[in-house]
Image (cartoon, grey):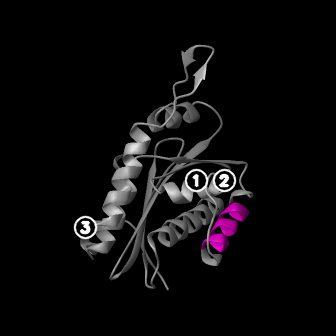
Amino acid sequence: MTAIKGQALADFVLEFPPHQEVEQGALVVIPSVEEVVMENQNSAPWWSLFVDGASNGDGAEAGIELISPESHKIRRATHLAFHATNTDVEYEALINDLKLTLEMKVENLNVFSDSMIVVYQINRGYQAKGPRTELYLKCVQRIIARFNEVRLELIPHRKNEGADELAKLVSRREATLLGVVPLDIQR
């Protein structure tokens, strides 16, 4: 129940930010995810990565949707066969998928996640607490440094449907519904 309340609060903060920036009397408009994707498709080759993870009593699952500059989608699901918190799963998914994009020679990457904690820790808004979280954060920072440019953006849960759906399918053990989506099991 706490996780649901936390997600509802995170979605509310995203929809109604606590402050709005004003620039010379005009409201600064922050572009939507779709506008960022379209804008970046018109410039240097930018890829978009949507990542989501969840933890429950049976383990932890993650889903990703990687979108090429030509709008081709690569989808992947991962089951973590070890105990992990929701934050751990978000980091595991992000680390694995950053490595995948590096192997694919992606240089510029927009990463979209609905995990406020992970996004703010990486963007230096929140302090990483605990040795495990600090290790995850350092690992992500080392991987990000290998790209030309990476932008990490917090998005509402409902805008992360593709990655979320994959994580839920793995959680429900509905492998037949995953179809041709690769399913990794990480121990």
Residue 180 in which image quadrant: bottom left
Q: Which residue is the site of mark 1?
A: 120
Residue 6 on image: x %, y %: 38, 58
Please, what is the three-letter code of the amino acid marked with disc 2? Arg
Q: Mark number for residue 124?
A: 2
- Of residues 89 and 121, the one drawn nearer to the viewer in this rendering: 121
User: Gap between marks 1 and 3, in whole Å?
Assistant: 33 Å
Instruction: Decide whether residue 96 is among the magenta residues.
Output: no
The residue segment tinted magenta is: 133-143
* Residue nearest the viewer, comparing 77 with 29: 29
Residue at the spot 57% in from the left edge and 27% down from the top edge: 21
**Residue at left 65%, top 66%?**
137
> Judging from the image, what secondary structure is the residue with disc 1 in?
helix
Rendered position, 62 above or below 56: above
Residue receiving disc 3? 177
Establish if 1 lies above or below 109.
Answer: below
